[in-house]
């Protein structure tokens, strides 16, 4: 089974009979395995902040998954009651929402950004709340440091390693790489690991990182610095909108540079925002297969969209990411109930660590997810795509570092 569930959205939910604000109750939304109480999950979403361009569809994908699964009977006959709120990419607001959800008695949380996910990790561990998010920062995969965080895709650092492997091969083994990154914990997450990888592999690649100022209307200045470096490759760790501006500036100046986007700018939004001609030929490191490549795991999404009267072409990769992040959590919850265990955070964590592979229908990294007690890194495999004629075309399905 690739997924099932039900939703209650505050900010984006389609108001319907599915409305169930995350209610706690005496059993905190969990209860005994034979309970019929709704399962409460809190969602911390960026709908209006600096990463809202990809945060919004990600949130929509999670809510769609919940609605679909609840319509298919929920999890072991229990509906999912999810409360989604916008934190506008502000860490203090995420912390406030987290406290609200703890008071509401949720059994798990879906978060979003690296800064807030890392800031909450200590509390998440203390409160024993399984926590997944849109952040794929490497420290979150270590159970010794982040015992209740689970990362459902290759880390940003693994994606950087794959990108550098590709660049090394494409360049013929010698070249200069400029890394343009969001000026935040999210943006900085893979930078040092990338530099370490170049040294570890003995690549003859220059490597220099540049922070991308927030709110910039263009990146001509950064490109000038990359030119002075001699860079032919620009790895971007940012969301789609600024990456598209970089692509436009490269095209406008006629520069001989190829962009290699990691995860959050490796999507259709980057291509659409830049324009097909401008995006043409740039490389996209994307762990989640876009709808256009037609993996088995896209079938339940297509069924849901058909029932909703929604054109699958309007669904981007960030939306798919949200769907499968929620799927991973739901599968852990289901395993807990099937095993006859009380629905507590500690039991959900144990399920995720011991249940074996979680089928994603080849959507994530071309294979299943699998966590363990030693590692909360669900996968190290990612797809490599190229922008061709306005589409994401798969070059490799399961690249690993």
Image: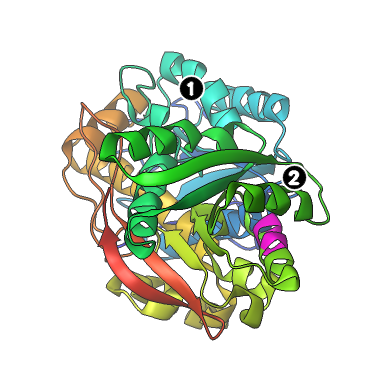
Question: Dot 1, how many residues are within 10 Å of its Cα: few (below 14), some (14-19), or many (20+)?
Answer: some
Please report the residue visible at 50 percent of the width from the left and 31 percent of the height from the top. 106
Question: Where does the image place residue 9, in percent across and percent down from the top left?
Answer: 63, 51
Q: Please, is residue 117 above or below residue 288 in the view?
A: above
Please report the residue visible at 77 percent of the width from the left and 55 percent of the height from the top. 220
Q: Please, is residue 99 above or below residue 131 in the view?
A: above
Describe residue 351's horizontal placement relative to residue 64 as left or right.
left
Q: Is residue 71 visible?
A: yes
Q: What's the magenta bit mostly, secondary-structure-wise?
A: helix
Describe residue 59's horizontal placement relative to residue 337 as left or right.
right
Tell which circle, 1 or 2, labels the residue nearer the N-terminal end.
2
Please report the residue visible at 71 percent of the width from the left and 24 percent of the height from the top. 92
Question: Where does the image place residue 322, in percent across and percent down from the top left?
Answer: 49, 55
Describe residue 263's horizontal placement relative to residue 401 as left or right.
right
Residues drawn in magenta: 241-246
Q: Secondary structure at mark 1?
A: helix
Q: Which mark is residue 49?
A: 2
What is the C-alpha distance between the residues marked 1 and 2? Answer: 21 Å
Question: Where does the image place residue 196, in percent across and percent down from the top left?
Answer: 37, 32
Q: Which residue is tagged 1?
A: 121
In front here: 70 or 2? 2
Please report the residue visible at 30 percent of the width from the left and 62 percent of the height from the top. 2
Q: Can you say which quadrant of the picture contains the N terminus?
A: bottom left
């Amino acid at each position: 089974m690739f997924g099932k569930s039900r939703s209650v959205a505050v900010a984006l939910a389609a108001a319907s009979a599915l409305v169930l604000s995350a209610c706690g109750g005496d059993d905190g939304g969990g209860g005994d395995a034979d309970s019929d109480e709704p399962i409460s999950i809190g969602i911390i979403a960026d709908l209006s902040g600096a990463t809202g361009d990809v945060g919004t569809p990600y949130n929509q994908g999670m809510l769609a998954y919940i609605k679909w699964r609840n319509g298919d009977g929920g999890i072991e006959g229990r509906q999912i009651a999810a409360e989604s709120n916008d934190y506008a990419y502000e860490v203090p607001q995420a912390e406030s929402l987290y406290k609200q959800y703890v008071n509401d008695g949720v059994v798990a949380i879906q978060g979003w950004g690296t800064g807030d996910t890392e800031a909450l990790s200590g509390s998440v561990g203390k409160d024993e709340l399984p926590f997944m998010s849109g952040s794929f920062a490497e420290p979150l995969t270590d159970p010794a440091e982040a015992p209740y965080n689970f990362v459902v895709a290759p880390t940003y650092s693994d994606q950087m390693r794959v990108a550098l492997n590709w660049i090394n091969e494409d360049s013929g083994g010698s070249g200069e790489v400029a890394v343009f990154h969001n000026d935040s914990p999210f943006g900085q997450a893979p930078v040092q690991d990338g530099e370490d990888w170049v040294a570890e592999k003995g690549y003859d690649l220059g490597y220099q990182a540049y922070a991308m100022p927030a709110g910039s209307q263009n990146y001509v200045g950064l490109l000038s610095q990359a030119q002075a470096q001699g860079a032919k490759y620009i790895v971007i760790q940012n969301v789609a909108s600024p990456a598209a501006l970089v692509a436009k500036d490269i095209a406008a100046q006629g520069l001989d540079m190829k962009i290699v986007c990691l995860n959050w700018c490796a999507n259709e939004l980057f291509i659409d925002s830049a324009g097909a001609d401008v995006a043409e030929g740039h490389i996209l490191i994307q762990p989640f297969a876009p709808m256009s490549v037609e993996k088995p795991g896209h079938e339940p999404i297509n069924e849901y969209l058909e029932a909703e009267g929604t054109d699958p072409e309007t669904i981007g990769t960030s939306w798919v990411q949200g769907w499968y992040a929620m799927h991973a959590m739901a599968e852990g919850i289901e395993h807990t109930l099937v095993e006859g265990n009380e629905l507590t955070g500690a039991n959900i964590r144990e399920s995720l660590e011991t249940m074996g592979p979680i089928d994603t229908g080849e959507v994530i990294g071309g294979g299943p997810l699998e966590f363990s007690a030693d590692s909360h890194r669900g996968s190290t495999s990612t797809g490599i795509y190229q922008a061709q004629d306005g589409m994401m075309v798969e070059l490799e399905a399961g690249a690993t570092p």
